[in-house]
């Protein structure tokens, strides 16, 4: 895959933006360009060298200050022992947050309870209500909200200010939630006889809908709205009628497929909404 490097114009504009006392020059970068340049500089030594050379030419005072600081730090850094290899917990921290742990634990507990109740009420009635099937669509929603919540994550502000805090990070954390929820639902569905398609499509459709609405109103608000709507429009009538709702039966799967496709399409179309820090809500 070909890597696109920032042009000389982009690096020059980035340098002007980053210069001490810069007052919004005419060539200032847009927010998406600024974050794209910073994300690229994190992984490209060649472009960091280009930026360093540009600093030495355009900002000699900054270059002199950097050289003076480096001359003081270099002997101390040489005496420091190398950092140990990253452990599994440190690697997982790039996919999850501490705030997600209790939510994911609660999801597993709810799944286990629904499985036990389904097994206790197992019988020959084909219209019997499967609590696992009824709850499956909204189980990932709480974890997704906790993965990107200003109120639940103590490091939210720090994370939202990083160059990689856009949609890719949100999708990574969403994948971490699904990696926990889907195996639990798969096991529960196998134990209760519920086919995977019956719970998988609604589960993914609700997740994509939460992300799609999250670009407009924030992930936490979207998760609350989606979960409340499901509980009011499907769960409550299902429990009151004593029969599985039509949307959860096999003939309702095409509808869930359409909802999933629309949610993914909106997320892709609105991917730029996650670029500016103010949109991370």
Image: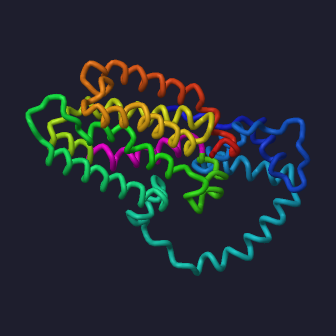
Please name the residue shown 84% across and 46% down the image: 16
**Which residue occupies the foreground of this view, 168 or 39?**
168
Q: Which of 110/158 is in front?
A: 110
Residue 231 lies left or right of residue 216; in this view the side is left
Q: Which residues are magenta?
A: 166-183
Based on the displayed image, in which of its 4 quarters is residue 247 positioned? top left
Q: Examine the structure image and report whether residue 167 is included in the region drawn in magenta.
A: yes
The single residue placed furthest to the left in the displayed view is 124
192, above or below 82, in the image: above
User: Which is the main secondary structure of the residues drawn in magenta?
Assistant: helix
52 or 217, which lies in front? 217
Give the mark count: 0
Residue 179 inside the magenta-drawn segment? yes
- Residue 194 is situated, as x and y percent measured from the top left of the image, at 19, 35
**Residue 154 occupies quadrant:** bottom right
Residue 128's place in the image compared with 246, above or below, is below
Q: Quadrant of residue 268?
A: top right
Q: Is residue 73 left or right of residue 204?
A: right
x 31%, y 52%: residue: 110
Q: Residue furthest front?
A: 240
Please provide percent x and percent y for residue 170. Answer: 52, 44
Tell me residue 96's x, y (percent). 46, 55
Q: Residue at x 37, y 24 (%)?
A: 256
The residue at the point 52 percent across, 78 percent down is 81
Coloration mode: rainbow
């Amino acid at each position: 895959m070909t890597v696109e490097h920032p042009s000389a114009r982009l690096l020059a504009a980035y340098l002007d933006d980053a210069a001490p006392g810069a007052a919004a020059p005419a060539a200032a970068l847009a927010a998406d360009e600024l974050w794209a340049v910073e994300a690229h500089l994190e992984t490209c030594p060649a472009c960091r060298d280009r930026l360093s050379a540009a600093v030495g030419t355009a900002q000699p005072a900054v270059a002199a200050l950097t050289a003076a600081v480096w001359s003081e730090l270099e002997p101390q850094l040489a005496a420091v022992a190398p950092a140990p290899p990253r452990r599994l917990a440190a690697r997982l921290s790039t996919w999850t947050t501490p705030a997600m742990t209790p939510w994911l634990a609660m999801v597993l507990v709810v799944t286990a309870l629904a499985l036990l109740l389904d097994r206790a009420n197992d019988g020959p009635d084909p219209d019997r209500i499967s609590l696992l099937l009824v709850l499956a669509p909204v189980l990932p929603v709480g974890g997704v909200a906790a993965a990107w919540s200003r109120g639940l994550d103590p490091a939210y502000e720090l994370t939202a200010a990083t160059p990689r805090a856009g949609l890719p990070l949100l999708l990574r954390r969403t994948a971490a939630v699904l990696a926990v929820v889907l195996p639990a639902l798969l096991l529960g569905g196998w134990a209760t006889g519920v086919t995977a398609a019956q719970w998988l499509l609604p589960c993914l459709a609700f997740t994509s809908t939460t992300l799609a609405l999250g670009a407009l109103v924030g992930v936490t608000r979207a998760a609350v709205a989606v979960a409340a709507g499901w509980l009011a429009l499907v769960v409550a009538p299902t429990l009151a009628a004593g029969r599985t709702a039509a949307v959860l039966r096999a003939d309702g799967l095409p509808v869930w497929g359409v909802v999933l496709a629309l949610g993914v399409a909106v997320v892709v179309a609105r991917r730029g909404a996650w670029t500016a820090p103010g949109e991370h809500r």
